Each structure stands twice: as C-alpha cells, then as structure tokens.
Image (tube, rainbow, N blue to C red):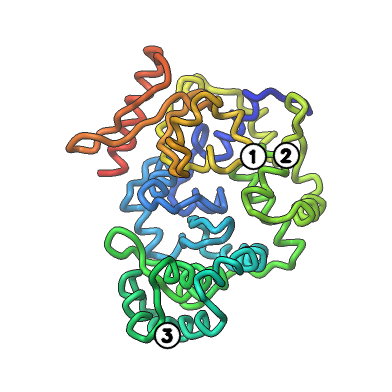
Amino acid sequence: MTASRTDVLRMRRLAQAIDGDREHSPADVVRRMLAVQAQDFGAACWALGLRTTDATRSDVLADLDAGRIVRSWPMRGTLHFVPTEDLRWMLSVTTERMVAGLARRHAELELADHDFGRARDLLVAELEGGRSIGRADLMALWEGNGIATAGQRGYHLIYYLAQTGVVCWGPTHRTQQALVLLDEWAPQGRSLEEDEAHAEFLLRYLTGHGPATLKDFVWWTKGTVAGAKRGLAVLGDAVTTLEVEGTSYLVTAELADRAAAHPERRSERDAVHLLPGFDEYLLGFQDRSPILEDEHAAAIVPGGNGVFQPIIVARGRIVGTWRTGGAKGEPEARPFGELGAGQRAALARSARAYRRFAD
C-alpha cells in the first residue's frame, strides 16, 4: 500500500490519541502506548493528560498511587511510565542486554556483584510488608550500612535493582515517587514466551506509535533486528506495510482501517497541540525527519545537551517551542514562523487545556 508523509503523520496522531478519539484515563493512555518516556516527571504527567478527554494532574497521580501505572527503566536506560501488568515481560526482553551494556561503567564505579547483592538485601528488608522509601532516604540507608552512593553509584544501584525486577517507582512521594518492591506493588503480571514477548512488544509499539519503521522499533527498545523480525513473523496479518517515498513503514491493520474509514476532520486539520519536552511523538522514533525540519533541531535541543524542549505541533509537524512563564505558569509560545488566525485560536485552546490540567 502506498501512502504520503501526511498520511503517516495523521495515523501517528490517531495512534497516540493526540487527534481523533482520546483515552478516558491516564492509565488507558499508557496501556495504548505501552511506554511513555518519563525522566522528566512533570512533562510525562502532561504527556498522559493531553491524550485524555479531561484528566488533570491529580488524575495522573491517582493512577500512580493506585498502581495502575508504574515508572521504571524497561528499555534504553530511560525512565518510562508503563502499564503495571506489562513491566515484567518487557524486562524479560531487555534486561540482559541493558545490564551487559553497563559492565564497563560498573567497573569504573567499582561496583561488583557483592555490592549489588548487599544493596538489594538492605532495600528488600526495608521495603518488605508494603513499605516504600524515597530516594534521599534510600541513599542514607545505604551510606549508613557502608555502601558508598556518591559519583552515580547510588543511581546505578537503583537502576540495576529496577532493571532486574526487584523494585519500581510506585506511589507519589513529595514531588516525585517512592520505591517499592515490584512483587508486592504489582503481584500480578503477564508472563510471555520469548517469541510471544517480541511480538507483543512490536504490536504494542505500533498500536501506540505507528506507522513506524522496523529501525524505529529496534532503536526504541534497544533490542535486536533479529528479535524484531521474529516478532513481526508471529504477528502475520495483524501488521501491514505502507510504502512512503521509498521507505517501508509498519502499521497495524486496525489503525490503517480506522484511518481509511474516518477521513480527517476539520478539527484535526486546524488543531495546534502543546506537547511536553521528551514527548513520544518526537522521541518515539529514530528517524524524526517526517516531524522536524533540520533547521529547527537546535531549537528543540539547545546546545545538543539532550534536554528536549516542549514543542508546538500543527498538522503533525513541529512548528515551534513553548514554556510555562509568569506567576500563573501561563504557556508562552515561541513559533518558528507566523501562525495564521485559525492556528492562533487553536493554540489558545491548547493553552487553556494545559492550564486546566495543571490546576
């Protein structure tokens, strides 16, 4: 099937619940997308809120406190919001490669197996029985028992214990979250065989991000091409291919049918969205050229420091950045060029939606 870049971007907005039907709750958004990048906690909360009908930040925190969403490192060494029931099988696909890739860094930090074992035993003893602990208190616990945490040692100890399924970030704690034992916080989880897990990973990625290339998926998971191809073979007719200017994009048959059955509405054509920094609409793909012009890349990541700015999206393309300013946290738009009257009105509606969410 042949398609245009415009078709691809519209399908992506539909897949991500940016346009078209939105989800009822933040937990529903995470289930649709499987993983939402969440190293910036506040930005990630808005990433969920904007994809719902009218959820507020309090609703996001409620889903976290209820254990319907967890925050962990399921892939790429990056924090993500994921559905609680899916975290274990995701780790079964990614943990071995992620941990092996950190061997040199662990050696530089003088972290050995006995350090991880001792840190685990202390943390498990502290958390058993449904208790939780904040990051600062955990560092104090380890330091008080002879485990040095300076120089990123503490971070790597937490990361390893989360990556190996011992702990996850659970209930809200001050402005962030507290750590809990995964087996206590999420006693029920899906268990998938290896090929089934690869297939589920790919299907859920395409459900919440597609259309996308196989390279996009491999980059997103930091998995292997072989694993991705095995998953694709299992999926069969559930996935089809779009040919766009010489590039093959994978898309679920359900999304392709939905887009074809429901022509683009005027509200979609005119919509202007305020997306947070690190949003999946941009960071969910290795190839970002369909979304972002090269000349504007420096404005999204100033100085190439890896910190992605909040973005303004119109008709699927990034047309500017924004930030919260003033005493009331009003969104301040910084478009790359002049916006038309309709776009300015749509931008104002998105700003009101952000204020409702934050308030």
Q: Amino acid at mark 1?
A: Gly
Crowd tier of the residue under label 2, counting other residues whose Cα lies within 10 Å: few below 14, some 14–19, many 20 or above? many
Q: Residue at x 69, y 23 (%)?
A: 4
Residue 355 in sight: yes
For residue 5, above or below residue 80? above
How many labels were placed on the picture?
A: 3
Q: Are marks 2 and 1 in contact (CB under 8 Å)?
A: yes
Residues under labels 3 and 2: Cα distance? 46 Å
Q: Which residue is mark 1?
A: 210
Q: Are marks 3 and 2 in contact (CB under 8 Å)?
A: no
The quadrant the C terminus occupies is top left
Classify mark 3: helix, strand or loop.
Answer: helix
Q: Which residue is mark 3?
A: 122
Q: Residue at x 33, y 46 (%)?
A: 56
The quadrant the N terminus occupies is top right
Q: Amino acid at mark 3?
A: Leu
Front residue of 133 and 305: 305
Judged by depth in the image, the label closer to the viewer, 3 or 2, is: 3
Crowd tier of the residue under label 1, counting other residues whose Cα lies within 10 Å: few below 14, some 14–19, many 20 or above? many
Q: Are marks 1 and 3 in contact (CB under 8 Å)?
A: no
For residue 183, above or below residue 257? below
Measured from the top left, where is residue 234 in percent x and y?
80, 54
Which badge, 1 or 3, comes first in the chain's sequence?
A: 3
Measured from the top left, where is residue 8 in percent x and y?
64, 29
Q: Residue at x 72, y 39 (%)?
A: 250
Front residue of 356 and 94: 94
Q: Which mark is residue 250?
A: 2
Crowd tier of the residue under label 3, counting other residues whose Cα lies within 10 Å: few below 14, some 14–19, many 20 or above? some
